[in-house]
Image (spheres, rainbow, N blue to C red):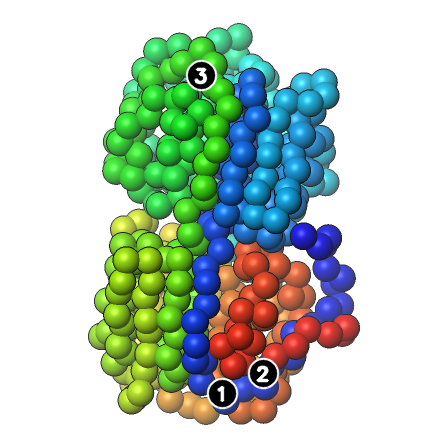
């Protein structure tokens, strides 16, 4: 894995070519990060395979090292093991880089009875409240203080509790699971998040000796254990990456076979693509997306899993710029998910935004322009739009893409895209 990219590096895209061929999906970023945090809970090494080679994984490894753990990546394998003196306060400069650092709150409380960390950084996509995390941890016996931008928590011994979440927060569900696996007694999380990576975290923890049932549904039961042991766990495929390639194939009127994908994770996206005039074939571990005719405008609303993933909303807006007609996209989760709209307009897209609703007037030709990426999924949307635009599109701040996608430009180039990374 390479280190963080220079701020002035850009991605140059020559649009107009349909994507064709096959592409393999990497492991899930959103599963790998909490599973790496879970390594703090074990007395023996945790070995993860199929880990994506992305900047966020590198950052999490550095954070774990700052806490006294050993986190080594070789290829797609990461090993986390106890190493030096156990610390309870990670490097704040590292935690500021990504939202997933918040998972350390539950992991450190469960492993070491104490945690001190700044409020997490990451993509600015809107308010992402953490009150439900704190209420749940307090119900389990933790003392949690909020001092300015810092969170400080301690518990001599966590105990089981019945926690009802106001809304199915993914990071909140994962945080409470990490805290509960070594708590005394039984913890029940009701209205839990049902995303695939939540279920994968449970599989990982169970392989380490935890007793978790119901993950992937809205009621998760965790029976606490005294210790966790060595395990080998394979990270599930990244359905957001798979969905991004599916949308790119549809937008460019291409034909792409997506390999190493769990199709059930993308039921809503595939339904929308079919309604828009695409052909979607599903196999055991693959899906084929193609479009030969006109793309039709189809409305969409994001919703917690199993609804349409908010992490695919920006890409879908880019897709709808290529459709005939008017589509309405409602973002139900994050009020700032329409960041890329202003950049898409620079390409010639006709999009109106009012609050959480975007109205896309499709069918207007896009022409290359210089764009700035603001977050991971916005970046994917701008790349898709650039692939559809006439002429050259230049995307700045491509480091955001490297936080969430393993070798995005290399995989797209393998599908026939004309793009290259170069100094700004």
Decide: few, some or many residues near mark 3? Use Cα within 10 Å; few <14, some 14-19, many ≥20.
many
Secondary-structure class at tag 1:
loop
Residue underneath mark 1: 17
- First in sequence: mark 2 or mark 1? 1
- First in sequence: mark 3 or mark 1? 1
Q: Is residue 352 above or below residue 253?
A: above
Q: Where residue 173 appears, x then y in whole percent?
A: 39, 34
Mark 3 vs mark 2: give the one in front.
Answer: 2
Q: Nearer the viewer, residue 32 or 163?
A: 32
> Mark 2–mark 1 contact, CB under 8 Å?
yes
How many tags in the picture? 3
Q: Is residue 116 above or below residue 24?
A: above
Q: Where residue 159 appears, x then y in whole percent?
A: 40, 12
Q: Which mark is residue 171?
A: none
Decide: few, some or many residues near mark 2? Use Cα within 10 Å; few <14, some 14-19, many ≥20.
some
For image coordinates 39% across by 66% down, the residue present is 258
Q: Is residue 93 above or below residue 20?
A: above
| Figure quadrant of the C terminus | bottom right
Rendered image quadrant of residue 308: bottom left
Per the model, the C-alpha gap separating discs 3 and 2 is: 51 Å
Secondary-structure class at tag 3:
loop
For image coordinates 33% across by 25% down, the residue present is 212
Residue underneath mark 2: 418
Q: Which mark is residue 182?
A: 3
Mark 3 vs mark 1: give the one in front.
Answer: 1
For image coordinates 52% across by 38% down, the residue present is 48
């Amino acid at each position: 894995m390479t280190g963080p990219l220079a701020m002035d590096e850009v991605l140059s895209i020559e649009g107009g070519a349909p994507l064709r061929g096959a592409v393999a999906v990497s492991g899930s970023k959103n599963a790998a990060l909490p599973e790496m945090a879970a390594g703090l809970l074990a007395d023996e090494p945790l070995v993860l395979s199929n880990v994506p080679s992305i900047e966020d994984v590198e950052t999490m490894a550095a954070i774990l090292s700052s806490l006294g753990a050993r986190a080594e990546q070789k290829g797609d394998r990461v090993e986390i093991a106890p190493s030096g003196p156990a610390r309870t306060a990670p490097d704040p400069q590292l935690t500021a880089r990504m939202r997933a650092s918040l998972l350390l709150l539950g992991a450190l409380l469960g492993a070491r009875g104490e945690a001190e960390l700044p409020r997490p950084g990451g993509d600015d996509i809107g308010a992402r409240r953490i009150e439900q995390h704190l209420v749940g941890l307090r119900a389990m016996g933790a003392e949690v203080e909020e001092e300015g931008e810092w969170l400080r928590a301690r518990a001599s011994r966590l105990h089981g509790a019945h926690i009802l979440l106001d809304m199915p927060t993914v990071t909140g569900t994962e945080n409470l699971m990490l805290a509960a696996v070594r708590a005394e007694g039984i913890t029940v999380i009701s209205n839990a998040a049902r995303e695939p990576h939540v279920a994968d975290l449970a599989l990982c923890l169970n392989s380490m000796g935890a007793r978790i049932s119901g993950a992937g549904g809205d009621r998760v039961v965790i029976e606490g254990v005294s210790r966790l042991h060595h395990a080998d766990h394979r990270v599930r495929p990244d359905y957001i990456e798979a969905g991004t390639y599916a949308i790119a194939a549809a937008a460019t009127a291409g034909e792409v076979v997506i390999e190493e994908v769990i199709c059930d994770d993308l039921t809503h996206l595939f339904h929308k693509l079919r309604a828009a005039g695409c052909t979607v074939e599903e196999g055991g571990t693959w899906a084929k997306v193609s479009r030969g005719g006109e793309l039709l405008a189809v409305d969409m609303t994001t919703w917690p899993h199993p609804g349409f993933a908010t992490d695919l909303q920006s890409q879908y807006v880019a897709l709808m710029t290529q459709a005939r007609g008017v589509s309405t996209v409602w973002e139900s989760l994050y009020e700032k998910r329409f960041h890329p709209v202003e950049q898409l307009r620079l390409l010639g897209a006709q999009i109106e935004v009012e609050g959480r609703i975007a109205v896309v007037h499709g069918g207007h030709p896009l022409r290359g322009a210089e764009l700035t990426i603001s977050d991971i999924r916005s970046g994917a949307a701008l790349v898709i739009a650039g692939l559809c635009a006439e002429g050259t599109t230049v995307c700045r701040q491509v480091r955001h893409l490297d936080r969430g996608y393993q070798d995005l430009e290399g995989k797209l180039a393998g599908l026939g895209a004309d793009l290259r990374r170069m100094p700004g």
